[in-house]
Amino acid sequence: MRPFLKIVAVVGVLFALAAAGGYIVVRYPALVSARYTLTLATGPVASEGQKVLAAFIRDLASEHPLVRLVPVTTDSGRESGKALAEGRVDLAVVRSDDEAAANGRTIFVLRQDGIAIILPPDAKIETVSALAGKPLAVAQGSDPGLLRALTAFLGLRETDLIAMPAADIGPALKARRAVAALVTGPLGPGPITDAFARIRKSFRAKPSYLDIPEADAIAARSPSYRSVEIKQGTFGGTPTEPDESIHSFAVRTLLVSRASLPDRVAGEITRLMLTTKAKLVANLPAAGQMEAPETERSSLLPVHPGTLAYLNGEQESLLDETVNYYWLSVMVFAILAPLASWIASRRQLRRSREDKVKLRRVIELVILAKAGTAAQMACADEELEATSEWLLARLGSGEIEREHFQFFEEMIARVRATIEKRIACDGEACVTDRGEVSNIKRERR
Protein backbone atom coordinates (compact mmCIF):
# COMPACT_ATOMS: atom_id res chain seq x y z
CA MET A 1 0.00 0.00 0.00
CA ARG A 2 1.28 3.46 -0.91
CA PRO A 3 2.15 5.80 1.98
CA PHE A 4 -0.58 8.25 0.95
CA LEU A 5 -3.22 5.51 1.09
CA LYS A 6 -1.95 4.40 4.48
CA ILE A 7 -2.29 7.94 5.83
CA VAL A 8 -5.82 8.23 4.40
CA ALA A 9 -6.81 4.88 5.95
CA VAL A 10 -5.43 5.79 9.39
CA VAL A 11 -7.10 9.22 9.33
CA GLY A 12 -10.39 7.62 8.25
CA VAL A 13 -10.30 5.08 11.09
CA LEU A 14 -9.45 7.76 13.66
CA PHE A 15 -12.24 10.00 12.37
CA ALA A 16 -14.76 7.11 12.57
CA LEU A 17 -13.69 6.31 16.13
CA ALA A 18 -13.92 9.99 17.14
CA ALA A 19 -17.37 10.30 15.58
CA ALA A 20 -18.60 7.14 17.34
CA GLY A 21 -17.16 8.35 20.66
CA GLY A 22 -18.76 11.77 20.27
CA TYR A 23 -22.13 10.20 19.45
CA ILE A 24 -21.98 8.00 22.55
CA VAL A 25 -20.97 10.93 24.79
CA VAL A 26 -23.80 13.11 23.46
CA ARG A 27 -26.60 10.53 23.21
CA TYR A 28 -25.56 8.00 25.87
CA PRO A 29 -23.33 9.78 28.41
CA ALA A 30 -24.46 7.36 31.12
CA LEU A 31 -22.38 4.68 29.39
CA VAL A 32 -19.16 6.63 29.94
CA SER A 33 -20.03 8.49 33.14
CA ALA A 34 -21.09 7.41 36.60
CA ARG A 35 -23.80 10.11 36.68
CA TYR A 36 -26.22 11.65 34.21
CA THR A 37 -26.92 15.35 34.85
CA LEU A 38 -30.29 16.74 33.73
CA THR A 39 -31.75 20.24 33.94
CA LEU A 40 -35.32 20.47 35.23
CA ALA A 41 -37.67 23.45 34.85
CA THR A 42 -39.65 23.37 38.11
CA GLY A 43 -41.98 26.36 37.80
CA PRO A 44 -42.41 29.29 40.22
CA VAL A 45 -40.70 29.23 43.61
CA ALA A 46 -42.97 28.23 46.54
CA SER A 47 -45.52 26.48 44.29
CA GLU A 48 -46.70 23.06 45.46
CA GLY A 49 -45.11 21.33 42.47
CA GLN A 50 -41.81 23.11 43.07
CA LYS A 51 -41.83 22.10 46.75
CA VAL A 52 -42.42 18.45 45.92
CA LEU A 53 -39.69 18.43 43.28
CA ALA A 54 -37.25 20.27 45.54
CA ALA A 55 -37.74 17.56 48.18
CA PHE A 56 -37.35 14.89 45.51
CA ILE A 57 -34.08 16.43 44.26
CA ARG A 58 -32.70 16.60 47.81
CA ASP A 59 -33.56 12.96 48.34
CA LEU A 60 -31.82 11.99 45.10
CA ALA A 61 -28.68 13.89 46.02
CA SER A 62 -28.45 12.07 49.35
CA GLU A 63 -28.62 8.64 47.73
CA HIS A 64 -26.08 9.37 44.93
CA PRO A 65 -28.11 7.80 42.13
CA LEU A 66 -27.31 7.52 38.44
CA VAL A 67 -29.35 10.66 37.71
CA ARG A 68 -28.55 14.13 39.05
CA LEU A 69 -31.22 16.83 38.62
CA VAL A 70 -30.36 20.52 38.42
CA PRO A 71 -33.48 22.68 39.06
CA VAL A 72 -34.18 25.69 36.84
CA THR A 73 -36.80 28.09 38.24
CA THR A 74 -39.25 29.63 35.75
CA ASP A 75 -41.99 32.22 36.15
CA SER A 76 -44.83 29.88 35.18
CA GLY A 77 -45.71 26.48 33.85
CA ARG A 78 -45.97 27.96 30.36
CA GLU A 79 -42.39 29.20 30.63
CA SER A 80 -41.28 25.72 31.71
CA GLY A 81 -42.97 24.20 28.66
CA LYS A 82 -41.37 26.78 26.39
CA ALA A 83 -37.93 26.05 27.85
CA LEU A 84 -38.42 22.35 27.15
CA ALA A 85 -39.64 22.96 23.60
CA GLU A 86 -36.63 25.17 22.87
CA GLY A 87 -34.20 22.58 24.24
CA ARG A 88 -32.96 24.74 27.12
CA VAL A 89 -33.84 22.05 29.68
CA ASP A 90 -34.08 18.26 29.66
CA LEU A 91 -37.17 17.98 31.89
CA ALA A 92 -40.04 20.28 32.77
CA VAL A 93 -43.13 20.39 34.96
CA VAL A 94 -46.04 21.21 32.64
CA ARG A 95 -49.80 20.85 32.58
CA SER A 96 -51.47 18.26 30.39
CA ASP A 97 -53.15 21.04 28.39
CA ASP A 98 -49.75 22.57 27.53
CA GLU A 99 -48.45 21.97 24.01
CA ALA A 100 -45.10 20.88 25.44
CA ALA A 101 -46.80 17.85 27.06
CA ALA A 102 -47.90 16.58 23.65
CA ASN A 103 -44.52 17.19 22.02
CA GLY A 104 -42.46 15.76 24.89
CA ARG A 105 -42.56 12.40 26.66
CA THR A 106 -44.39 11.91 29.95
CA ILE A 107 -42.40 10.32 32.76
CA PHE A 108 -44.58 10.84 35.83
CA VAL A 109 -47.85 12.38 37.01
CA LEU A 110 -47.17 14.80 39.85
CA ARG A 111 -50.76 15.72 40.71
CA GLN A 112 -54.27 16.28 39.37
CA ASP A 113 -56.25 19.50 39.75
CA GLY A 114 -59.98 18.99 39.42
CA ILE A 115 -63.11 21.11 39.62
CA ALA A 116 -65.81 20.74 42.25
CA ILE A 117 -69.30 22.22 42.44
CA ILE A 118 -70.32 22.86 46.07
CA LEU A 119 -73.97 23.42 46.90
CA PRO A 120 -75.28 25.09 50.08
CA PRO A 121 -77.18 22.87 52.54
CA ASP A 122 -80.61 24.08 51.44
CA ALA A 123 -79.99 23.84 47.66
CA LYS A 124 -82.64 22.25 45.46
CA ILE A 125 -80.33 21.77 42.46
CA GLU A 126 -79.83 18.15 41.45
CA THR A 127 -78.18 18.34 38.00
CA VAL A 128 -75.43 20.44 36.48
CA SER A 129 -77.72 21.67 33.71
CA ALA A 130 -79.90 23.35 36.37
CA LEU A 131 -77.05 25.82 36.98
CA ALA A 132 -77.59 27.49 33.59
CA GLY A 133 -78.51 31.15 33.93
CA LYS A 134 -77.89 31.26 37.68
CA PRO A 135 -75.10 33.21 39.45
CA LEU A 136 -72.15 31.05 40.50
CA ALA A 137 -69.43 31.97 42.97
CA VAL A 138 -65.90 31.33 41.71
CA ALA A 139 -62.90 31.45 44.01
CA GLN A 140 -60.23 33.85 42.84
CA GLY A 141 -57.22 32.01 41.43
CA SER A 142 -59.31 29.11 40.16
CA ASP A 143 -57.97 27.28 37.13
CA PRO A 144 -59.18 29.15 34.02
CA GLY A 145 -58.80 26.12 31.77
CA LEU A 146 -61.08 23.93 33.86
CA LEU A 147 -63.65 26.71 34.23
CA ARG A 148 -63.59 27.36 30.50
CA ALA A 149 -64.07 23.68 29.65
CA LEU A 150 -67.02 23.34 32.05
CA THR A 151 -68.83 26.54 31.03
CA ALA A 152 -68.30 25.87 27.30
CA PHE A 153 -69.67 22.34 27.50
CA LEU A 154 -72.70 23.22 29.66
CA GLY A 155 -73.43 26.48 27.89
CA LEU A 156 -72.97 28.59 31.01
CA ARG A 157 -72.50 32.32 30.55
CA GLU A 158 -69.31 33.93 31.76
CA THR A 159 -71.38 36.81 33.14
CA ASP A 160 -72.91 34.37 35.61
CA LEU A 161 -69.48 33.63 37.12
CA ILE A 162 -68.79 35.91 40.07
CA ALA A 163 -65.13 35.93 41.10
CA MET A 164 -64.48 36.56 44.78
CA PRO A 165 -61.96 35.68 47.50
CA ALA A 166 -62.31 32.16 48.83
CA ALA A 167 -63.22 33.50 52.28
CA ASP A 168 -66.28 35.29 50.84
CA ILE A 169 -67.83 32.27 49.17
CA GLY A 170 -69.69 31.06 52.28
CA PRO A 171 -71.26 34.44 53.05
CA ALA A 172 -72.15 34.94 49.36
CA LEU A 173 -74.04 31.65 49.24
CA LYS A 174 -75.76 32.42 52.53
CA ALA A 175 -76.83 35.83 51.22
CA ARG A 176 -78.05 34.10 48.03
CA ARG A 177 -75.82 36.19 45.79
CA ALA A 178 -74.86 32.82 44.25
CA VAL A 179 -76.55 29.44 44.10
CA ALA A 180 -73.40 27.33 44.04
CA ALA A 181 -69.61 27.61 44.20
CA LEU A 182 -67.10 26.48 41.58
CA VAL A 183 -63.74 25.64 43.12
CA THR A 184 -60.65 24.12 41.50
CA GLY A 185 -57.66 22.53 43.17
CA PRO A 186 -55.87 19.27 43.91
CA LEU A 187 -57.95 16.16 44.42
CA GLY A 188 -57.13 16.10 48.09
CA PRO A 189 -56.45 18.63 50.86
CA GLY A 190 -56.37 22.14 49.44
CA PRO A 191 -58.67 24.88 48.10
CA ILE A 192 -61.64 22.55 47.56
CA THR A 193 -61.69 21.25 51.13
CA ASP A 194 -61.05 24.76 52.48
CA ALA A 195 -64.04 26.17 50.55
CA PHE A 196 -66.22 23.29 51.76
CA ALA A 197 -65.23 24.04 55.38
CA ARG A 198 -65.96 27.77 55.02
CA ILE A 199 -69.41 27.12 53.56
CA ARG A 200 -70.18 24.70 56.39
CA LYS A 201 -69.08 27.34 58.90
CA SER A 202 -71.30 30.01 57.30
CA PHE A 203 -74.40 27.81 57.24
CA ARG A 204 -73.60 25.79 60.38
CA ALA A 205 -74.71 22.85 58.31
CA LYS A 206 -73.03 20.48 55.90
CA PRO A 207 -72.98 21.49 52.21
CA SER A 208 -72.84 18.92 49.42
CA TYR A 209 -70.93 18.20 46.24
CA LEU A 210 -72.77 18.12 42.90
CA ASP A 211 -71.94 15.18 40.67
CA ILE A 212 -70.80 15.94 37.10
CA PRO A 213 -71.89 12.89 35.07
CA GLU A 214 -70.90 14.72 31.87
CA ALA A 215 -67.21 14.49 32.87
CA ASP A 216 -66.50 11.71 30.33
CA ALA A 217 -68.00 13.77 27.53
CA ILE A 218 -66.04 16.86 28.59
CA ALA A 219 -62.81 14.87 28.61
CA ALA A 220 -63.66 13.43 25.18
CA ARG A 221 -64.13 16.94 23.79
CA SER A 222 -60.96 18.23 25.46
CA PRO A 223 -58.55 15.23 25.49
CA SER A 224 -55.93 17.12 27.52
CA TYR A 225 -58.27 16.76 30.50
CA ARG A 226 -59.10 13.52 32.22
CA SER A 227 -62.36 12.22 33.62
CA VAL A 228 -61.89 11.28 37.27
CA GLU A 229 -63.93 9.66 39.98
CA ILE A 230 -63.51 11.38 43.32
CA LYS A 231 -63.94 8.48 45.67
CA GLN A 232 -65.78 8.63 48.97
CA GLY A 233 -63.64 10.26 51.68
CA THR A 234 -61.05 11.71 49.24
CA PHE A 235 -61.24 15.18 50.80
CA GLY A 236 -61.09 13.87 54.38
CA GLY A 237 -62.81 15.59 57.27
CA THR A 238 -65.08 14.29 60.03
CA PRO A 239 -67.17 12.76 58.69
CA THR A 240 -65.16 12.25 55.53
CA GLU A 241 -66.14 13.98 52.32
CA PRO A 242 -67.56 13.39 49.88
CA ASP A 243 -69.96 10.95 51.50
CA GLU A 244 -70.27 9.13 48.18
CA SER A 245 -68.22 8.96 44.99
CA ILE A 246 -68.76 11.78 42.51
CA HIS A 247 -67.58 12.39 38.96
CA SER A 248 -65.52 15.32 37.75
CA PHE A 249 -62.66 16.07 35.36
CA ALA A 250 -59.13 17.23 36.02
CA VAL A 251 -55.99 18.62 34.45
CA ARG A 252 -52.78 16.79 35.28
CA THR A 253 -49.42 18.26 36.21
CA LEU A 254 -46.78 16.14 34.50
CA LEU A 255 -43.06 15.60 34.59
CA VAL A 256 -42.20 15.68 30.89
CA SER A 257 -38.85 15.05 29.18
CA ARG A 258 -37.44 15.77 25.77
CA ALA A 259 -38.14 13.01 23.26
CA SER A 260 -34.43 12.18 22.88
CA LEU A 261 -33.85 11.35 26.56
CA PRO A 262 -32.26 7.85 26.71
CA ASP A 263 -34.68 5.10 27.71
CA ARG A 264 -32.53 3.83 30.58
CA VAL A 265 -32.37 7.31 32.14
CA ALA A 266 -36.14 7.81 31.83
CA GLY A 267 -36.71 4.42 33.42
CA GLU A 268 -34.32 5.30 36.25
CA ILE A 269 -36.19 8.55 36.96
CA THR A 270 -39.49 6.64 37.02
CA ARG A 271 -38.04 4.12 39.47
CA LEU A 272 -36.71 6.85 41.74
CA MET A 273 -40.04 8.71 41.72
CA LEU A 274 -41.87 5.58 42.78
CA THR A 275 -39.38 4.58 45.47
CA THR A 276 -39.11 8.05 47.05
CA LYS A 277 -42.85 8.80 47.00
CA ALA A 278 -43.42 7.16 50.40
CA LYS A 279 -40.63 9.24 51.98
CA LEU A 280 -41.99 12.49 50.56
CA VAL A 281 -45.58 11.90 51.71
CA ALA A 282 -44.46 11.93 55.35
CA ASN A 283 -43.43 15.59 55.07
CA LEU A 284 -45.43 16.77 52.06
CA PRO A 285 -48.96 15.33 51.85
CA ALA A 286 -49.25 16.76 48.33
CA ALA A 287 -46.74 14.10 47.21
CA GLY A 288 -49.44 11.48 47.80
CA GLN A 289 -51.01 12.52 44.50
CA MET A 290 -47.93 11.43 42.55
CA GLU A 291 -48.55 8.41 40.36
CA ALA A 292 -47.15 6.60 37.36
CA PRO A 293 -48.68 7.45 33.96
CA GLU A 294 -50.95 5.10 32.05
CA THR A 295 -49.14 2.42 30.12
CA GLU A 296 -51.50 2.53 27.15
CA ARG A 297 -49.49 3.44 24.05
CA SER A 298 -52.56 5.01 22.41
CA SER A 299 -52.64 7.84 24.96
CA LEU A 300 -52.86 11.37 23.55
CA LEU A 301 -49.88 12.41 25.66
CA PRO A 302 -47.06 9.99 24.75
CA VAL A 303 -45.34 8.26 27.63
CA HIS A 304 -41.57 7.87 27.41
CA PRO A 305 -40.58 4.39 26.12
CA GLY A 306 -38.10 4.04 29.00
CA THR A 307 -40.90 4.70 31.50
CA LEU A 308 -43.15 2.17 29.77
CA ALA A 309 -40.36 -0.40 29.75
CA TYR A 310 -39.78 0.04 33.50
CA LEU A 311 -43.48 -0.07 34.39
CA ASN A 312 -44.01 -3.17 32.23
CA GLY A 313 -40.92 -4.89 33.61
CA GLU A 314 -39.14 -4.76 30.24
CA GLN A 315 -36.32 -2.35 31.04
CA GLU A 316 -32.86 -3.54 30.03
CA SER A 317 -30.14 -3.49 32.62
CA LEU A 318 -26.82 -1.74 31.98
CA LEU A 319 -25.23 -5.14 31.37
CA ASP A 320 -27.87 -6.07 28.78
CA GLU A 321 -27.50 -2.72 27.05
CA THR A 322 -23.71 -3.07 26.98
CA VAL A 323 -24.01 -6.59 25.58
CA ASN A 324 -26.35 -5.30 22.86
CA TYR A 325 -23.80 -2.68 21.84
CA TYR A 326 -21.09 -5.34 21.90
CA TRP A 327 -23.01 -7.64 19.57
CA LEU A 328 -23.91 -4.71 17.33
CA SER A 329 -20.23 -3.86 16.99
CA VAL A 330 -19.47 -7.52 16.27
CA MET A 331 -22.11 -7.57 13.54
CA VAL A 332 -20.74 -4.39 11.98
CA PHE A 333 -17.23 -5.82 12.10
CA ALA A 334 -18.47 -9.10 10.60
CA ILE A 335 -19.89 -7.14 7.66
CA LEU A 336 -16.98 -4.77 7.14
CA ALA A 337 -14.14 -7.25 7.68
CA PRO A 338 -14.98 -9.48 4.66
CA LEU A 339 -15.53 -6.37 2.55
CA ALA A 340 -12.13 -4.98 3.53
CA SER A 341 -10.56 -8.38 2.95
CA TRP A 342 -12.15 -8.60 -0.51
CA ILE A 343 -10.87 -5.14 -1.45
CA ALA A 344 -7.39 -6.03 -0.21
CA SER A 345 -7.45 -9.33 -2.10
CA ARG A 346 -8.48 -7.57 -5.31
CA ARG A 347 -5.61 -5.13 -4.95
CA GLN A 348 -3.24 -7.98 -4.22
CA LEU A 349 -4.56 -9.93 -7.20
CA ARG A 350 -4.00 -6.94 -9.48
CA ARG A 351 -0.44 -6.61 -8.21
CA SER A 352 0.09 -10.35 -8.53
CA ARG A 353 -0.98 -10.28 -12.17
CA GLU A 354 1.44 -7.45 -12.89
CA ASP A 355 4.22 -9.38 -11.15
CA LYS A 356 3.45 -12.48 -13.24
CA VAL A 357 3.64 -10.48 -16.44
CA LYS A 358 7.05 -9.14 -15.44
CA LEU A 359 8.23 -12.62 -14.42
CA ARG A 360 7.16 -14.13 -17.76
CA ARG A 361 8.99 -11.34 -19.58
CA VAL A 362 12.18 -12.01 -17.58
CA ILE A 363 11.96 -15.71 -18.56
CA GLU A 364 11.59 -14.72 -22.21
CA LEU A 365 14.67 -12.54 -21.85
CA VAL A 366 16.58 -15.52 -20.37
CA ILE A 367 15.89 -17.48 -23.55
CA LEU A 368 16.77 -14.47 -25.67
CA ALA A 369 20.07 -14.02 -23.82
CA LYS A 370 21.13 -17.52 -24.86
CA ALA A 371 20.18 -17.41 -28.52
CA GLY A 372 19.58 -13.77 -29.47
CA THR A 373 21.62 -11.51 -31.69
CA ALA A 374 23.79 -8.70 -30.44
CA ALA A 375 21.07 -6.16 -31.18
CA GLN A 376 18.46 -8.26 -29.37
CA MET A 377 20.75 -8.66 -26.36
CA ALA A 378 21.29 -4.89 -26.24
CA CYS A 379 17.54 -4.32 -26.15
CA ALA A 380 17.16 -7.06 -23.53
CA ASP A 381 19.83 -5.47 -21.34
CA GLU A 382 18.07 -2.11 -21.44
CA GLU A 383 14.71 -3.74 -20.64
CA LEU A 384 16.23 -5.60 -17.70
CA GLU A 385 17.69 -2.35 -16.38
CA ALA A 386 14.23 -0.70 -16.62
CA THR A 387 12.72 -3.69 -14.80
CA SER A 388 15.24 -3.29 -11.99
CA GLU A 389 14.28 0.36 -11.62
CA TRP A 390 10.57 -0.60 -11.57
CA LEU A 391 11.23 -3.19 -8.86
CA LEU A 392 13.16 -0.68 -6.77
CA ALA A 393 10.31 1.82 -7.00
CA ARG A 394 7.80 -0.86 -5.98
CA LEU A 395 9.98 -1.83 -3.01
CA GLY A 396 10.25 1.80 -1.90
CA SER A 397 6.47 2.30 -1.98
CA GLY A 398 5.82 -0.91 -0.07
CA GLU A 399 3.95 -2.56 -2.95
CA ILE A 400 6.29 -5.55 -3.12
CA GLU A 401 7.81 -7.73 -0.46
CA ARG A 402 11.58 -7.69 0.02
CA GLU A 403 11.77 -11.45 -0.70
CA HIS A 404 10.04 -10.96 -4.06
CA PHE A 405 12.36 -8.06 -4.87
CA GLN A 406 15.45 -10.17 -4.11
CA PHE A 407 14.10 -13.06 -6.21
CA PHE A 408 13.57 -10.80 -9.22
CA GLU A 409 16.92 -9.10 -8.79
CA GLU A 410 18.77 -12.42 -8.70
CA MET A 411 17.08 -13.54 -11.91
CA ILE A 412 17.81 -10.22 -13.64
CA ALA A 413 21.43 -10.29 -12.46
CA ARG A 414 21.90 -13.80 -13.92
CA VAL A 415 20.35 -12.84 -17.23
CA ARG A 416 22.49 -9.73 -17.52
CA ALA A 417 25.57 -11.79 -16.58
CA THR A 418 24.73 -14.23 -19.36
CA ILE A 419 24.45 -11.35 -21.80
CA GLU A 420 27.81 -9.95 -20.69
CA LYS A 421 29.49 -13.34 -21.08
CA ARG A 422 28.22 -13.73 -24.61
CA ILE A 423 29.30 -10.21 -25.49
CA ALA A 424 32.76 -10.78 -23.92
CA CYS A 425 33.34 -14.14 -25.63
CA ASP A 426 36.72 -14.87 -27.18
CA GLY A 427 37.43 -14.24 -30.84
CA GLU A 428 37.31 -11.43 -33.23
CA ALA A 429 33.73 -12.07 -34.17
CA CYS A 430 32.74 -11.78 -30.60
CA VAL A 431 34.70 -8.52 -30.23
CA THR A 432 33.08 -7.21 -33.41
CA ASP A 433 29.69 -8.22 -32.07
CA ARG A 434 30.54 -6.52 -28.84
CA GLY A 435 31.45 -3.33 -30.68
CA GLU A 436 28.23 -3.55 -32.59
CA VAL A 437 26.33 -3.95 -29.35
CA SER A 438 28.02 -0.89 -27.88
CA ASN A 439 27.34 1.13 -31.02
CA ILE A 440 23.68 0.05 -30.95
CA LYS A 441 23.40 1.06 -27.30
CA ARG A 442 24.92 4.47 -28.01
CA GLU A 443 22.57 4.96 -30.96
CA ARG A 444 19.52 4.01 -28.91
CA ARG A 445 20.59 6.38 -26.14
Image (spheres, grey):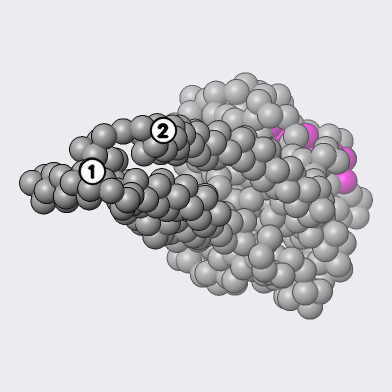
Residue 195: image tag: none
Disc 2 target residue: 367
Q: Check if residue 92 falls in the magenta segment.
A: no
**Which residue occupies the extreme left position in the image?**
443
Depth check, mark 1 against mark 2: the one in front is: 1
In front of the other: 38 or 436: 436
Q: Residue at x 55, y 45 (%)?
A: 259
Q: Which comes before the other along the chain, label 1 or label 2?
A: 2
**Which residue occupies the extreme front position in the image?**
427
Magenta-highlighted residues = 227-233
Dot 2: within a 10 Å radius of its alpha carbon, few (fewer than 14), some, or many (20 or more) residues?
few
Q: For marks 1 and 2, give the CA distance.
A: 21 Å
In front of the other: 376 or 254: 376
Q: Check if residue 228 falls in the magenta segment.
A: yes
Taking the image as shown, residue 164 lies to the left or right of residue 235, namely left
Q: Quadrant of residue 440?
A: top left
**Which residue occupies the extreme right position in the image?**
239
Secondary element at tag 2: helix
Q: Residue at x 74, y 36 (%)?
A: 294
Dot 1: within a 10 Å radius of its alpha carbon, few (fewer than 14), some, or many (20 or more) residues?
few
Q: Quadrant of residue 308?
A: top right
Q: Quadrant of residue 312?
A: top right
The image position of residue 355, as x and y in percent, is 44, 38
Disc 1 target residue: 429
Name the amino acid type tagged 1: Ala
Above-or-below relation of 99 to 417? above
Name the amino acid type tagged 2: Ile
